[in-house]
Amino acid sequence: MTENYNKEEIIKYVEETDGVVLYFYSEQCVACQPLRKKIKQWVEKNYPKLNLLFINAVENPDITAYFSIFSNPTILVFLGGKEVMREGSFLSEKVFSDKVNRLYHLLFDE
């Protein structure tokens, strides 16, 4: 989902939702588009209970500043309202899985 968001809505959503991935990008970023597609596929395939939000950093500078985003793309993962991962443009599926997998399954597996 890509939209212009309200900072307060995003903060509340992150705090109240068990699993959230925020993907910050810009249209001028060469790496953003291919990585965006990969992240979407990884989350849908392996982490279906994570809610993925795409945030245009240029169009949402207040959200970008609030989360201290200094480059694009940047991916933040929140589980149980807490930031558990922050990665920049050189993210691999292995790094993503290694950092998120255990916590994801602790939170969502019954």
Image (cartoon, grey):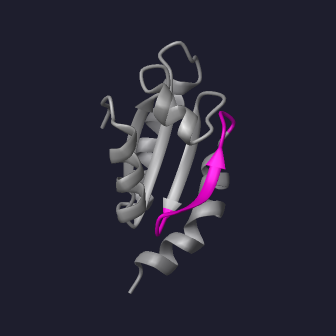
Q: Residue at x 61, y 35 (%)?
A: 69
Between 58 and 104, the residue placed more toward the observer is: 58
Q: In the rendered image, which quarter is residue 71 located in?
A: top right
Q: Residue at x 64, y 61 (%)?
A: 99
User: In the image, is residue 11 part of the stretch drawn in magenta?
Assistant: no
User: Residue 35: horizontal and vertical position, in percent?
Assistant: 53, 33
Q: Would residue 107 be found to the left or right of residue 4 on screen?
A: right
User: In the image, is residue 85 part of the stretch drawn in magenta?
Assistant: yes
Q: Is residue 82 above or below residue 105?
A: above
User: Residue 48: horizontal and vertical position, in percent?
Assistant: 35, 60
Q: Residue at x 34, y 36 (%)?
A: 6
How many numbered markers are drawn? 0
- Give the quarter of the figure containing the C terminus: bottom left
User: Residue 81: horizontal and vertical position, in percent?
Assistant: 47, 64
Q: Would residue 47 be found to the left or right of residue 5 on screen?
A: right
User: Residue 2: horizontal and vertical position, in percent?
Assistant: 32, 32
Range drawn in magenta: 79-90
Spot the residue most to the bottom: 110
Q: Is residue 14 above or below residue 110?
A: above
- Give the quarter of the figure containing the N terminus: top left
Q: Would residue 5 be found to the left or right of residue 22 on screen?
A: left
Q: Residue at x 60, y 49 (%)?
A: 93
Q: Is residue 110 above or below residue 98?
A: below
Spot the residue most to the top: 28
